[in-house]
Amino acid sequence: MEFIEALKSRLSRNSVDTSLEGLHAYSYDATRKSSLPCAVVYPLSTNDVVSIVKIAHRFGVPIVPRGAGSGLTGGAIPVPGCILMSLEKMNNLLRIDQENTTAIVEPGIVNSALQARLAPAGYFFPCDPGSAAFASIGGNIVENACGMRGRHFGSCYSQVKGLEYVGADGAVVSTGYFSSGTGRILQALLCGSEGTLGIVVKAALTILPIPRDFTTALLFFREKRVCFDYALGVYEKGLLPYSLEFIDGELLRLLTVSNPVFRKEGCEALLLLEAGGDAEPYHALARDHVPQEIVIAKDSKERAAFWEFRNSVSPCLYTIAPTKINEDIAVPLEKVPEFDAFLTDLGTTSSRVRILTFGHIGIGCFHSNFMFDGTDPLAVVEAEDLVRRAIQKAVALEGTISCEHGIGLSKREFLPIELPPESIRFHAAIKRAFDPSAIFNPGKIFLPTESS
Ligand SMILES: Cc1cc2nc3c(=O)[nH]c(=O)nc-3n(C[C@H](O)[C@H](O)[C@H](O)COP(=O)(O)OP(=O)(O)OC[C@H]3O[C@@H](n4cnc5c(N)ncnc54)[C@H](O)[C@@H]3O)c2cc1C
């Protein structure tokens, strides 16, 4: 194909892969759905990105950008005939600017690798998704990732001070650095754009001094209602813990099969609390909403064990069924008990689908996992129906269909449940203004009928 020859002539050796193994390796993301691209390219610099975009533009070939492929809505899944652009080799930490508490990075750097580079200088990057060990910063930015510290520090968007991206005509656009007010509109549009508006090639990020004084605790509850009352009480009292993570009893029982040290008979809900400063207000709340047991981490080793336990939830789910739809539905905090009760009832309507939930309770986020056997057609139909009903209920409660994973392919059919037609039209018009030839990630976020 002519455009592949053009790519090969412009990029360095090993930067274009058309081998079948190469195409397969980049055909999927964490949804486990897949589709083959025509070529995989690995830009090493902004200039490479510009060349690739210009070639794609000239030949009318779509580009699907990819960070680490950990997305849960199919954003990085190739579209037919596309160039898959993996940003993984643009992974440098360009500068740590302590005076301005800023790190300047390339997009392919993995979140945990950035944290590891910042830690010796006494800093951290606040955005902390459950996928930090493998997701890229570019992916975090364009998905507007949230995660464990989302309520305290805000989503990734609020930690981006400036961006550089390559637009559909190959222009390199800077939104300014150090929280420039002038570029704020473009920056806001790029954060959460899911690879549909431009390729992020550089970012200036907020970094903060690592807190020294905090408490990490596990709170086990016999009743979910008491657990939710405790969580609500935290925010009603104006407390703002770094993290407040929820795991439901059924999932907890599953997790403790391989981790019996965290098993508590009769426990129906767990909170993992991490908070700075004085712990007394949290103890006072526990006197009003009494947990079955509170375990406070004695040292950094125990703290790490608590977090390792929390982070084992996703892989553990596959021990009960081979197929998972992981949702990131969110509802206002006061509606969490009602939504949770709805999900529990929903779970009883199917013998083929089990619903297990954990989440970032501070942002009302329910990672409800619909577990089933994807080779059973009836189970697939039932799972999809349950997901739709959960989404409809969340929106009826003034919640959202996605608080952090984006829309991608998986949720585009649900977009009209949350957004009115005029809002979808306006979003689609922004896409057309940035990318009139629909080069960047076409078919993502909007159904084809909505984007034209
Ligand atoms: C176990 C697990 C736990 C998770 N926990 C969380 C969580 O707590 N919070 C959360 O928010 N998410 C979570 N996620 C989802 C996922 O990790 C995030 O969405 C993450 O930000 C995606 O990063 P990535 O580098 O893997 O992006 P990819 O999956 O490669 O891509 C995601 C989207 O970004 C686009 N893209 C990637 N890089 C660029 C770039 N440089 N320029 C333009 N577009 C680009 C792609 O086209 C795609 O649309 C989790 C996923 C898993 C598997």
Image: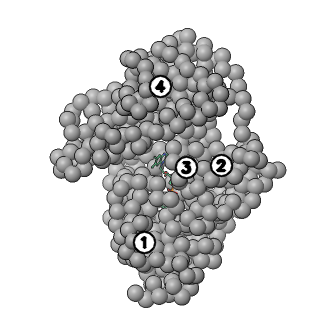
The kind of residue on which mark 2 rests is Gln
Of the residues under marks 1 and 4, which one precedes in the sequence?
1
The kind of residue on which mark 4 rests is Val
C-alpha separation, residue under disc 3 versus residue under disc 4: 24 Å
Q: Quadrant of the C terminus?
A: bottom left
Of the residues under marks 1 and 2, which one precedes in the sequence?
1
How packed mark 2 is, by other alpha carbons closer than 10 Å (few <14, some 14-19, many 20 or more), is many
How packed mark 1 is, by other alpha carbons closer than 10 Å (few <14, some 14-19, many 20 or more), is some
The kind of residue on which mark 3 rests is Ala
Which residue is identified by label 4? 261
Q: Nearer the viewer, mark 1 or mark 2?
A: 1
The single residue placed furthest to the right in the displayed view is 99
Q: Is residue 335 visible?
A: no
Please tell me which residue lies in front, 78 or 402.
78
Of the residues under marks 3 and 1, which one precedes in the sequence?
1
Residue shown at the point (70%, 21%) measured from the top left: 278
Q: Nearer the viewer, mark 3 or mark 4?
A: 4
Q: Is mark 1 within 8 Å of ligand 1?
A: no
How packed mark 3 is, by other alpha carbons closer than 10 Å (few <14, some 14-19, many 20 or more), is few
C-alpha separation, residue under disc 4 versus residue under disc 2: 29 Å
C-alpha separation, residue under disc 1 versus residue under disc 4: 42 Å
Of the residues under marks 3 and 2, which one precedes in the sequence?
2
- The percent position of residue 348, horizontal first and vertical second, equals 24, 30
Which residue is identified by label 1? 22
C-alpha separation, residue under disc 3 versus residue under disc 1: 23 Å
C-alpha separation, residue under disc 3 versus residue under disc 2: 10 Å
Residue shown at the point (51%, 68%) measured from the top left: 86
Of the residues under marks 4 and 2, which one precedes in the sequence?
2
Which residue is identified by label 2? 115
C-alpha separation, residue under disc 1 versus residue under disc 2: 29 Å
Which residue is identified by label 3? 133
